[in-house]
Amino acid sequence: MKRIIPLLGLLALLCTGCGASWEPAQVQFFAMDTVMTVTAYGKQAEQAARAVQEKVNDLDKLWSRTDENSEISRLNAHAGDGTMTALSPETAEILARAMEMKEESGGAFDPLLAPVMDAWGFTQSAYRVPEEGELAALLSLTEPDPELTYDDGFANAAASLKTEGQELDLGGIAKGMATCYAARAAREYDIDGLLLDLGGNLYTWGEKPDGSAWKIGVKDPNDTAALLCAFPMNDRTCSTSGGYERYFEQDGVIYHHIIDPADGYPAHSGLISVTVVGDSVWADAYSTACFVLGAEKTLDLWRAGEGLAGQADFVLVTEDRHVYLTEGLEEGLSFLGEENGYTYEIVYR
Ligand code: AMP
Ligand code: MG
């Protein structure tokens, strides 16, 4: 098993022209099974960075599948027994968003894949290749959808999983949802600029002290020390999903952690990495979903211009080293992949 822990940026940050006056508060911590880095500057940069750490740790306690006291674990433990488990607004919101994404992606994103993830050993790092029949039985647990009730603002929420054995795994959306809450927490303080890197979900806000824009780099999935491209970004999140992020190898075959709910096997859509730039929650969920859907279906969704996909931008990297970039990323784009044999095209609506 190889797990690549991101340095500052699963997507690297390009910090050009940083003046000597830039002394940001920087906090790094481990949560949600990954490294998180907060960089803030301004009068209350230190407080803002600490507030992010506190918020993310709180969310991790609510959503962790491995902590038996988390709300998600309690919900999972009651699957099929008819109990409605009370949920915090944060947990209700992530569950609602995850189910919305399941619908919007036509089932390519499915938060009920936990039993399948377990069968592959991704949850406990005990890797194995399950039989087809075993996967088919576990996939039947992705239906029906959970019952979820809440009032305005996700208050007074409760949920239940209808069938025994059903389990939620929010790994494909949790860091994006956390990015959304973290950005909100930081911006309660008097800060001028903010960069969040929550396990590869990069959010930028404000500007650098020299007034220049943040520029975000996307890693080459075949050579993660190199950058494929870079573009300016503000008040948006850039989220990447790639098979290279977590995988194991058996008998010369690589099995990665993004599962196609159609058959329970690691997705093989022809894409090796998907980057989505947009709203935090949707960028994370879409990067996972589109890795399953493949380039053609993703670009069809984007071209349609409707729903969540229509508001986002995409960087799609195919296994034969072609890169599709949607038009919203063209301005200020630096393409750096030629040396590693990549070609690219801008896709227009
Ligand atoms: P990400 O790194 O955001 O693409 O998320 C990958 C994680 O999402 C995996 O480690 C699983 O926890 C979960 N996951 C895997 N496949 C799917 C899928 N098809 N739909 C939703 N979540 C998934
Ligand atoms: Mg994701």
Image (spheres, rainbow, N blue to C red):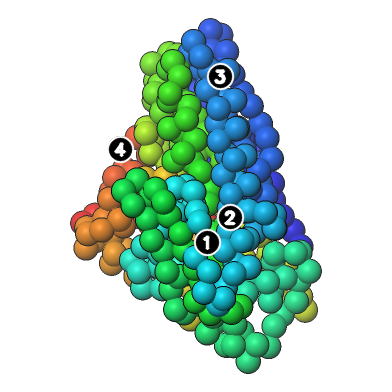
Mark 1, mark 2: which one is toward the viewer? 1
Residue 227 seen by the camera: no
Seen from the viewer's position, the closer of residues 187 and 349 is: 187
Give percent across and percent down for residue 111: 50, 66
Give the residue at mark 1.
Answer: 85
Q: Earlier in the sequence, mark 3 or mark 2?
A: 3
Asked which secondary structure carries label 1, the reply is strand
Secondary structure found at label 2: helix
Which mark sits nearer the N-terminus, 1 or 2? 2
| Residue contact at pointers 1 and 4, CB within 8 angstroms | no
- Check disc 2 and report the residue beneath it: 71
Q: Quadrant of the N terminus?
A: bottom right
Mark 2 CB in 8 Å range of ligand 1?
Answer: no
Q: Residue 58 at x, y = what percent?
A: 59, 40
Of the image marks 1 and 4, the number of the one nearer the N terminus: 1
Residue 201, image x, y percentages = 51, 44
Toward the top, the furthest residue is: 21
Label 2 environment density (alpha carbons within 10 Å; few <14, some 14–19, many ≥20) = many
Whether residue 235 is visible, yes or no, is: yes
Q: CA distance from mark 1 to mark 2?
A: 8 Å
The residue singled out by tag 3 in the image is 47
What residue do we see at 56% from left, 44% from top? 59
Residue at image x 55%, y 31%? 52
Q: Which residue is mark 4?
A: 331
Please give the name of the residue rendered at 64% of the width and 27% of the height, measured from the top-left corner: 27
- Mark 3 to mark 2 CA distance (whole Å): 28 Å
Distance from disc 2 to disc 4, alpha carbons, whole Å, reads 43 Å
Give the amino acid type for the residue marked by disc 1 in the picture.
Answer: Thr
Tell me which amino acid carries mark 4: Glu
Label 3 SS: helix
Q: Residue at x 38, y 61 (%)?
A: 149
Instruction: Please report contact status of discs 1 and 2: CB closer than 8 Å, yes or no.
Output: yes
